[in-house]
Image: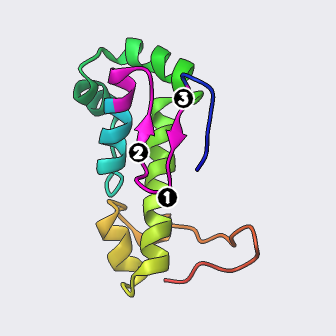
């Protein structure tokens, strides 16, 4: 389990649930995670949270310490990483599933312990 002081994101390995003091930010994070398989626009996240974009962006910086767009990209990369590791699909099929228009847009990098991601 990862713990954090009040107001920070806490990810529990058992459920991968976000615990956040702000309901709109929690809704936004949930929406981002549920849609990590495709490109998500910041305006979509704001709509799903029930807030205007600027207000949500300010709260995101306060509670998550990154932008909405950074969170969307991070979730998408995490999803892509999971699919690359767990599936037997070709890189082209994975690119399509993740909303990339071309598989050449996906660059494979070695992980921190030096293993190359395989598709």
Task: Give the distance between the C-alpha atoms of the residues marked 3 and 1, in whole angstroms.
Answer: 17 Å
| Mark closer to the chain start, 2 or 1 | 2
Name the quadrant containing residue 46: top left
Q: Which residue is mark 1?
A: 78
Q: Which mark is residue 32?
A: none
SS assignment at label 2: loop
User: x, y (%) of residue 9?
Assistant: 53, 34
User: x, y (%) of residue 59?
Assistant: 47, 17
What are the residue bounds of the magenta stretch? 8-26
SS assignment at label 1: helix
Q: Which residue is mark 2?
A: 17
Observer-nearest of 2 and 115 = 2
Up/down of 88 relative to 47, above or below: below
| Mark closer to the chain start, 3 or 1 | 3
Observer-nearest of 97 and 8 = 8
| Mark closer to the chain start, 3 or 2 | 2
Say which residue appears at 32% left-offset and 78% top-offset. 93
Task: Give the distance between the C-alpha atoms of the residues marked 2 and 1, in whole angstroms.
Answer: 15 Å
Q: How is the image coloured?
A: rainbow
Q: Which residue is mark 3?
A: 64
Up/down of 57 relative to 31, above or below: above
Up/down of 102 relative to 3, above or below: below
């Amino acid at each position: 389990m990862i713990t954090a002081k009040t107001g920070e994101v806490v990810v529990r390995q058992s459920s991968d649930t976000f615990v956040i003091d702000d309901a709109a930010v929690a809704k936004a994070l949930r929406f981002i995670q549920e849609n990590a398989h495709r490109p998500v626009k910041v305006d979509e996240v704001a709509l799903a949270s029930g807030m205007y974009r600027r207000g949500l962006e300010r709260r995101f910086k306060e509670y998550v310490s990154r932008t909405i767009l950074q969170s969307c990209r991070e979730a998408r990369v995490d999803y892509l990483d999971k699919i690359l590791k767990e599936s037997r699909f070709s890189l082209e099929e994975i690119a399509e599933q993740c909303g990339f228009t071309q598989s050449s847009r996906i660059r494979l990098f070695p992980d921190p312990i030096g293993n190359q991601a395989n598709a």
